[in-house]
Amino acid sequence: MAVVAAVLALAGCSGSDDPAAVSFELPGEVPSDVTFIDAPSDAPAAPSFELELLDGSTLDLAEQWEQRPVVLVFFESFCELCTQQQADITALSEEYRDAVLFVGVGSATSEDDAAEYVREHDIAYPVGLDPVGEVFRRYGVDEPPLVALIARGGQLVRGWPGGVEDLGSQLTEFVVAR
Amino acid sequence: MLRLRGRAALAVAVLIPVLAGCSGSSDDASGSGTEAGVVRVLIPDGNLRRLGEPCNGAGAFRSVHAEATFTVEDGDGVEVARGELPSGTAEQMMDVSFREGMRQPTMCVMDVDVEGLTTPDGYEFVVGDGFAVPIEPSDDAELIGEVLIS
């Protein structure tokens, strides 16, 4: 009997009672030694939106980018390129923890798969889902990954379909003075 | 290491094949019971990518992605196979020379294992948001057939 139960559990057909149990950290006070770079005067306004996070809370992006630059990371749990780039993004989100807010946005991914992705990649920044795809459309996301960089004040300064290999350099060039 | 004896081993031997194919499907119509043939799925989304990089369907084809469920149906609409799509690879879409490493219009190509399918004749590949496409013969002898999502 124990063997049968073990096989059922290993086969993964019994389902999980554990909901998408994840929690996120919002940045603290912006460090006093951080200086932000103003966006070019012709930079367009980033589309504002509210995002339902996996932990059940709601994040108002416009409130956030009034205080600090924001990096939007559009992803899907089944996206191999997203997975390949995630470690660098996670490391940068730690390095800029209180200076720049990183936000993950998925769409076709289920809540459980998104939560699993968050755990697998040690993501502490807020992650939410856009199941209807409205945010994806407004940011022109045809296929994740796409990384969008928003300056403090809410101007969209850069977007990288397919992701970006040198995001750290881009941050110091466009939004955070070093 | 887990060691199984007697009836326990028999129970596991019976259960594993059942559990491995939780959904199950009939494959009598396609001939062989367990062979897996490869169907090449072409997604002509024209998305800008680097050649050879991993991909999923883009734009109008976003529902055709890795882990999405597909079925194969016979001419009467009866499901003969079912599975999940793998990740695709970006391949050249038009015969234009772009600088090496530059992103260019591509299609996403997935090589999909379809258990039990030994011929493309009379079968449809059903996937994503209502895509149902005939499986066409392929010139590539290693493939059972090809599907152009449209």
Image (cartoon, grey):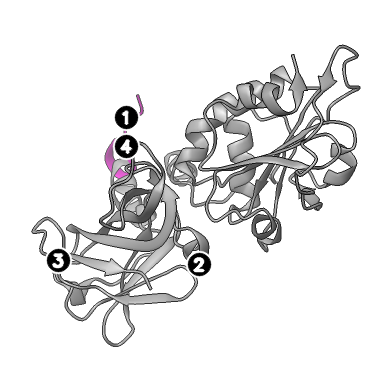
Residue at image mark 1: B3
Same subunit, tags 4 and 2: yes
Residue B100 marker: 4
Residue at image mark 2: B60
Compared to residue A177, the image places residue A137 above or below, namely: below
The mark closer to the camera, 3 or 2, is 2
Principal secondary structure, stretch drawn in magenta: loop
Q: Nearer the viewer, residue A141 or B96?
A: B96
- Magenta residues span B1-8
Give the quadrant of the C terminus of chain A: top right
Q: CA gap, disc 3 to disc 4?
A: 29 Å
Identify the secondary structure beneath mark 4: loop
Identify the secondary structure beneath mark 2: helix
Q: Position of residue A45 (x, y in %)?
A: 79, 49
Q: Nearer the viewer, residue A15 or A39?
A: A39
- Which of disc 2 and disc 1 is earlier in sequence? 1
